[in-house]
Amino acid sequence: SYVLTQPPSVSVTPGKTARISCGGNNIENQRVHWYQHKSGQAPVLVIYHNTDRPSGIPGRFSGSHSGNTATLTITRVEGGDEADYYCQVWDTGGDHVVFGGGTKLTVL
Amino acid sequence: QITLKESGPTLVKPTETLTLTCTVSGFSVSTSGSAVGWVRQPPGKALEWLALIYWDDTQRYRPSLQSRVTITRDASKNQVVLTMTSMDLVDTGTYSCASQRTGDGYFDLWGRGTLVTVSS
């Protein structure tokens, strides 16, 4: 079954750019979605279909993918961006949902 | 405004069956192309997808749990129900339902989740 690999943690100072990676075999052929999950709250979709932003999500959030890696980029990071971030795909081979292991973003 | 709200027991004993209900408001679970799924998160661990049901009652399950999990849809109540048999201590976690209003592979809206503890 398809596996998505994320770094456990990423740290960034306010105002800088955070990049969170999501590795998967030929992920460039997948549609990758990203969620922000703050403790005690419902997860929020921040990027879908690799690069699209839902209504209400700031333009500071963007997605990209190439080869075996998809990336969530957050520019001008704020303290409120501190959360766990998960990538997700639909595994067409197995016909099911796959989540990455999650990345904890710490704003220093 | 679209909301999803999970309900069910907060404590179950090992070997018992868990039944959770997701009540959806502001969006019909019978909308063509849509789906509703269940995701759980054990304490300190990652999100784990469990099951998905489409508007036409097509079901999809996490392969490792397929023998224990059942997802059903009650269109008259606009609810989706998850049943998990043979509960174990490792099944402790927060269980959330989430919608795929376009059925296009991503969860656009989530409930806040309900904590289920498995303990004797």
Image (cartoon, helix red, strand yellow):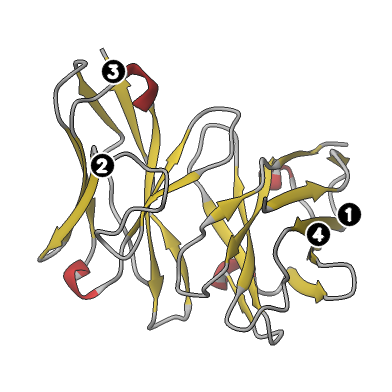
Q: Which residue is found at the position 30% from the left and 69% from the top?
A: A31
Q: Secondary structure at mark 1?
A: loop
**Is the residue under label 1 in contact with that under label 4 (CB below 8 Å)?**
no
The answer as to whether the residues below labels 4 and 3 share one chain is: no
Rendered location of residue B47, percent (x, y): 51, 48
Residue A59: mark in rendering? 2
Q: Element under label 2?
A: loop
Q: Position of residue A3 (x, y in %)?
A: 33, 63
3D distance between C-alphas at marks 4 and 2: 45 Å
Q: Amino acid at mark 3?
A: Val
Structural distance between the alpha carbons of marks 1 and 3: 42 Å
Q: Amino acid at mark 1?
A: Glu
Q: Sequence-wise, which precedes: disc 4 or disc 1?
A: 1
Residue under disc 4 on the same chain as residue under disc 2: no
Q: Chain of mark 2?
A: A
**Distance between mark 1 and mark 2 Cα atoms:** 47 Å
Amino acid type for the residue under numbered disc 2:
Gly
Q: Which residue is mark 3?
A: A107
**For numbered disc 4, what is the local secondary structure?**
loop
| Chain where mark 4 sits | B
The structure residue drawn at horizontal position 51% and vertical position 57%, both measured from the top left corner, is B108
Rendered residue at 69%/87% (across/down): B56
Q: Is residue A34 left or right of residue B72?
A: left
Q: What separation in Å lies between label 4 and label 1 (alpha carbons)?
A: 5 Å
Query: Furthest-left residue in view?
Result: A67
Identify residue for label 1.
B16
Residue labelled with disc 4: B86
**Which residue type does callout 4 highlight?**
Ser
